[in-house]
Amino acid sequence: MELLEFKDLKCVPDIIHPYTPALRNNNVPIVIDNGSYQCRVGWATSPEPLLLFKNLIAKPRKERSKKDTVEATQTPQLQVGNDIINIEAVRFQLKTQFDRDVVTHFEAQEHLFDYSFTHLGIDSENSVPHPVVLTEAVLNPNSSRQLMSELLFECYSVPGVSYGIDCLFSYHFNEVKPQENALIINIGYHTTHVVPIIATKTIFENTRRILQLKYPAHATSITLSRAEELLHSICAIALDYREELNRWTDPVYYEENIKKIQLPYSASLASSALTLEQQKERKRELARRLTEINARKREERLIEDEEKLNQLLYIQEMTEAGVDKEEIEKACAEYQIKNLQDLQKHINTLNMKIEKTRQKIIAANAAEEVEEPPTKQPKHNKMVFENEKAMHLFLQNAKKMRQDILNKKMTRKQKKQDMAKRRTAAGQERMRIISQLARKEKGNDDFGLRDEDWDIYKAISKDGKT
């Protein structure tokens, strides 16, 4: 079995051929095989075309970051034909003049004509003084031919144009003695034409155009250029279809002629390369990270719920303090609350949600302490005392410091709970200050002009700090 490798061939730029006096003075016709895949251009007196390039243009897009610079006013460099060295690098900027084998984009066609005439060496000013023989698709629409003629006559001032079908040209050129009856299968880049010939005449009414289908599988591996390479280097026409099928049924013939293509792939890290202990450690690390992420999310959710609860309690206090009804409705609309019953329902739901989240946090912390292996506990150095009295003194000081810390935490926690309640002295004072602020005349919003205004925030702060 043969393993094929892609060559990834690059285009070679065309040279500008000499425009000899014999060509200039004899009005030698220019033959242009305007195919949807490749364009072949040459003189009628030459046995082979001088130019062979893909019928494509690439126009780079302007960079948005250079809109306001001088470079933005410059037209991006246009690449035509074999000037496009790497087609895949600009595949999203490629344009062609064809739409299903019919020329419809004549701006691109003009660029390709300019490229062809320039590389043939024609240097006559504002004209191409040579007749043109141009190929076209079978049953080409009259509108397309009319616009093509207009382009050649008006833009290039050619003396004459002759159109012909490429498959019929090939049929008459390759048949030394044309058959009376024949069937032409013209396999093109976009379409396939089936052209019958009966009594040496082409039967156009029975001609068929078959549109080719596109298969997007392996789009990143089998690019357009590689698909063309496979088509032109591997594919062949079977002269006898049944005989060819019989050959491929033979296992020996199959093994000798089958071709294998290895698509590129990215090799992933094999898990077998890690030891069992490394795999376990990786799983433990992943579990630890997930636990930390979940704990952080629970804490963030708890903070958000507590903040929302405080806001709802504040609205409830406003209703009891007799604040303006319009202000209360505006505050309720922010949380999509319809009435007082709905407000109380939201408060109860948030209280239950906060309590559940706290229980989850406590359970997660307890589980983490239990699961933590004893080997990871920090090692403490032993403390040495001069006598037993010194040891008891140290213990008393440590207990006292611990009790002071616990008292501070309890005091702070009690203040938070008191601030959340409505009937405490701190809550009533807070509501009195809020009511005074709400009673100010509307339209005279001068709060903050004096430094003492900001002391109110210290008085009504959540933590009750001064």
Image (cartoon, helix red, strand yellow):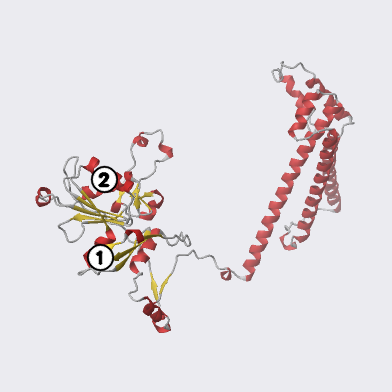
SS category of the residue bearing label 2: helix
Q: Residue at x 71, y 48 (%)?
A: 297
Q: Farthest right residue? A: 423
Residue 210 rendering spot, x and y as whole percentages = 40, 60
| Amino acid type at mark 2 | Ser
Nearer to us in this view, 377 or 142: 142
Q: Mark 2 and mark 1: span between their CA atoms?
A: 29 Å
Marks 2, 1: nearer the viewer:
1
Amino acid at the residue labelled 1: Thr
Rendered location of residue 435, percent (x, y): 82, 22
Placement of the C terminus among the 4 image quadrants: top right
Q: Is residue 231 left or right of residue 324?
A: left
- Determine crowd level at label 1: few under 14, some 14-19, many 20+ residues with C-alpha closer than 10 A: few
Residue holding disc 1: 200
Q: Of the numbered discs in the image, which one, if any, rests on residue 149?
A: 2
At horizontal 66% and vertical 63% (from top left) the residue drawn is 283
Above or below: residue 23 compared with residue 328: below
Q: Position of residue 379 (x, y in %)?
A: 73, 58
Q: Indicate the quadrant containing the N terminus: top left, top right, bottom left or bottom right.
A: bottom left
